[in-house]
Amino acid sequence: MNKSIAALIVGTCLASPLAIAQSNDTGWYLGLGAGRAYLEDDNRLVGVDFDADDTAMKVYFGYKINQYIAIEGSYADWGEPDDRIGGNKYEADLSGFGGFVMGILPVTDRFDLFAKIGVYLWDAELENKRTNLELADEDGYNLGFGFGAGYDLTNNVGIRVEFEAVDADTLDDAYAGTVGIHWQF
């Protein structure tokens, strides 16, 4: 009887780290991110060569199907960067929702690399702030993609650094770099 109890205790002790290590391989997660967004329009639509950056914020959520694949949705506000051109102040605004499929490459038990691709539904505006003239106000959907790295601080809390871009028709370039924290449950 004592050998059975000892075997059960030893087995439980050996199995527990394996169960804990695999606990973040699947499941739902929710996160917040912040960083810097860069928007550029090279005289394509409205006769200005706009080039500026601002603070970006995002909320993301997803489901990790297994250690290699996740489905993710997000809402991102890419700030309101402004640029002075010819004595006028121009301000851009880009925000929207994204839906992505993520490929994940586990490097260690706690560190992984990822890439994602999907659709981004965006709303973009460009305004001359001196005259309050709206030069562009468009929305649409285009390709969105990104890549980054994540690190699990605990079994339920992780951080990640990522680069994201959207091919919004109104702007030539729209990309952001963010640092995020997420909770897996």
Image (cartoon, rainbow, N blue to C red):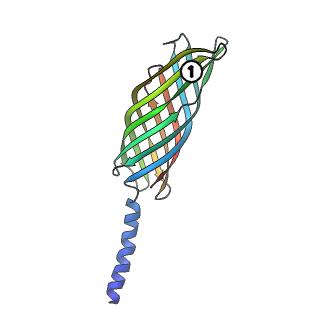
Q: Which quadrant holds the C terminus?
A: bottom left
Residue 71 location, x and y as percent? 37, 43
Question: In which image quadrant can residue 37 be found?
Answer: top right
Q: Which residue is under mark 1?
A: 51
**Going 41% across and 56% down the picture, which residue do you hit?**
24
Residue 103 vs 53, above or below: the answer is: below
Count of numbered marks: 1
**Going 60% across and 26% down the picture, which residue do you hit?**
81
**Going 38% across and 79% down the picture, which residue do you hit?**
9
Q: In this view, does 160 lie to the left or right of 91?
A: left
In front here: 38 or 182? 182
Residue 133 location, x and y as percent? 60, 13
Q: Which quadrant holds the N terminus?
A: bottom left
In front here: 173 or 94? 94
Packing grade of label 1 (10 A; few <14, some 14-19, many >=20) is many
Residue 113 vs 166, above or below: the answer is: below
**Going 53% across and 24% down the picture, which residue do you hit?**
39
Q: What residue type is labelled 1?
A: Asp
Question: In which image quadrant can residue 79 be found?
Answer: top right
The residue lying furthest to the bottom in this view is: 1
Q: Is residue 113 left or right of residue 77?
A: left
Residue 113 location, x and y as percent? 41, 45
Residue 108 vs 115, above or below: the answer is: below
Residue 156 location, x and y as percent? 47, 57
* Helix, strand or loop under label 1: strand
Q: Is residue 83 left or right of residue 96?
A: right
